[in-house]
């Protein structure tokens, strides 16, 4: 490695503003306690109006309610206070550089061993070509993640970012989950902090939120044994935030976990955001069983998807954004979720290898056009706002784009 790790200063300015972290006062006109049919939700509405933090018991009441209308009213009220009628989207490209992985998580239909049918690894040149196409199409972000490749050395990743940064200085590089960062730390024999500093120096702009799954040892040992445990995932994101890198967070729900375990996961994220702010959004990922070792499970229903998104909005009072990743929830349900606390529909995506609704060899071309995203947002009664990775407003003209 040629980078000087000592040269990179620590972040000194606060990574997130108080306005981003604090839940704003709700407009009382957006909550009608008299209209709440489920009595268990009324004390929660009163807490929200008083800007009090919700407890795990409140979270369970939200999950167990059959009063979906009131759940939407509560989550929608918080969403309106934070973002008004704005609904965000971005123009991005996902690049999954390889599905060859040292692990075999049971919920994952993406991973392959080298030589196995469907195994692939992109060359750096292929990734540059994909980045060129993304830039030409007006993308503002590359989202790059892959399996834990057993043989690629750490400098392959830093060189990749360095070249991408030189080739496309405007493209934001949101790359590598905490699981990959942990893997790099092992193969490079560097601390997590040293790995993050080297990646940041090479051009890393922020980190995605994948790999969190469910912060629970029982679920870990049954479904993704061998992978980083919750403490490790949280420590890596804490270190990234301390180094001035914003990150996202996820929860993979709808397999063997309980609702109580989901609530505990959200509370751990909320606590880390209090202690070391830097999470921009929560992305609840709806488990898609097809092609995985858990294909016998039914996966979450539409009702459970909507509840998970709304509960995330209400429990995570210090997270600015809640994203429905339409690949997981479907675009139709993502549109509906704008009325259940969601303010971000993510992006155009284009190529996505990790989850395919038809299973492992299904169609990886999964694209939304900007026109379609905007149409769905407007139809739901919201204002489409193009954002960059850091949620800054993007403006376009015939010659390109800039941050407003
Ligand atoms: S979830 Fe990630 S770490 Fe686990 S098998 Fe799939 S690619 Fe590998």
Image: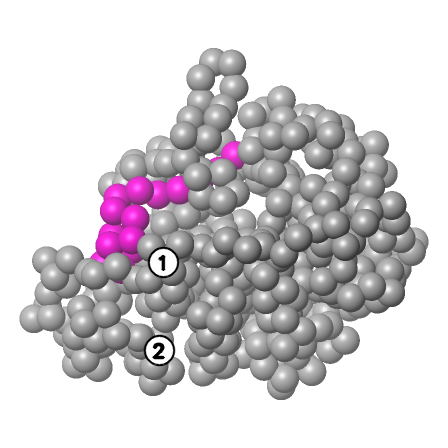
Instruction: Look at the numbered discs 2 and 1 and tell me whether their residues touch, using CB distance below 8 Å.
Output: no
The structure's colour scheme is one colour
- Image position, residue 278 (x, y; %): 51, 59
**How many angstroms separate mark 2 from mark 1 (CA)?**
24 Å
Q: Residues within 10 Å of mark 1 (few under 14, many from 20)?
A: few
At a point 78% along the width and 66% down the height, the residue shown is 191
Dot 2: what SS?
Answer: helix
The residue where tag 2 is placed is: 59
- Image position, residue 329 (x, y; %): 47, 55
Does the stretch in magenta take in 120? no
- Between 305 and 291, the one lying in front of the other is 305
Dot 1: what SS?
Answer: helix
Does the stretch in magenta take in 83? yes
The answer to whether residue 11 is seen in the rendering is yes
Relative vertical location of residue 133 with respect to residue 116 in this rendering, above or below: above
At a point 41% along the width and 48% down the height, the residue shown is 344
Q: Earlier in the sequence, mark 2 or mark 1?
A: 1
Relative vertical location of residue 377 with respect to residue 222 in this rendering, above or below: above
Image quarter of the C terminus:
top left
Q: Residue furthest top?
A: 398
At a point 29% along the width and 37% down the height, the residue shown is 383
- Between 255 and 160, the one lying in front of the other is 160
User: In this image, 179 relative to 33: left or right?
Assistant: right
The residue where tag 1 is placed is: 18
Residue 201 numbered tag: none
The residue stretch that appears in magenta: 77-91
Q: Quadrant of residue 293?
A: bottom right
- Image position, residue 145 (x, y; %): 70, 51
Relative vertical location of residue 29 with respect to residue 122 in this rendering, above or below: below
């Amino acid at each position: 490695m040629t980078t000087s790790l000592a040269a990179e200063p620590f972040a000194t300015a606060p990574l997130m503003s108080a306005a981003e972290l604090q839940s704003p006062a709700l407009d009382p006109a957006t909550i009608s306690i008299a209209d709440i049919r489920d009595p268990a939700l009324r004390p929660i509405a009163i807490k929200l109006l008083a800007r009090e933090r919700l407890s795990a018991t409140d979270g369970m009441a939200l999950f167990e309610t059959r009063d979906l209308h009131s759940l939407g009213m509560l989550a929608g009220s918080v969403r309106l206070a934070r973002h008004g009628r704005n609904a965000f989207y971005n123009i991005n490209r996902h690049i999954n550089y390889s599905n060859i992985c040292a692990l075999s998580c049971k919920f994952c239909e993406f991973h392959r061993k080298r030589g196995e049918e469907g195994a692939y690894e992109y060359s750096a040149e292929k990734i540059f070509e994909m980045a060129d196409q993304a830039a030409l199409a007006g993308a503002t972000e590359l989202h790059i993640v892959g399996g834990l490749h057993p043989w690629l050395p750490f400098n392959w990743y830093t060189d990749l970012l360095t070249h991408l940064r030189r080739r496309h200085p405007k493209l934001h590089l949101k790359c590598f989950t905490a699981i990959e960062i942990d893997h790099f730390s092992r193969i490079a024999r560097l601390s997590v902090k040293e790995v993050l500093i080297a990646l940041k120096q090479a051009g890393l702009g922020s980190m995605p939120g994948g790999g969190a799954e469910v912060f629970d040892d029982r679920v870990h040992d049954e479904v993704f044994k061998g992978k980083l445990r919750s403490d490790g995932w949280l420590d890596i994101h804490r270190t990234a935030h301390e180094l001035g890198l914003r990150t996202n967070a996820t929860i993979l729900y709808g397999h063997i976990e309980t609702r109580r375990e989901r609530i505990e996961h959200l509370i751990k994220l909320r606590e880390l955001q209090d202690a070391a702010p830097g999470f921009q959004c929560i992305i609840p990922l709806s488990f898609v069983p097809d092609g995985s070792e858990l294909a016998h499970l039914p996966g979450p229903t539409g009702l459970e998807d909507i509840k998970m998104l709304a509960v995330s909005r209400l429990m995570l009072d210090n997270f600015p954004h809640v994203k429905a990743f339409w690949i997981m929830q479907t675009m139709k349900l993502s549109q509906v979720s704008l009325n259940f606390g969601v303010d971000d529909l993510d992006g155009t995506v284009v190529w996505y290898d990790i989850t395919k609704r038809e299973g492992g060899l299904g169609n990886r071309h999964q694209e939304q056009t900007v026109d379609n995203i905007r149409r769905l947002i407007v139809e739901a009664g919201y204002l489409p706002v193009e954002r960059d990775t850091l949620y800054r407003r993007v403006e376009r003209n015939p010659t390109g784009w800039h941050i407003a």
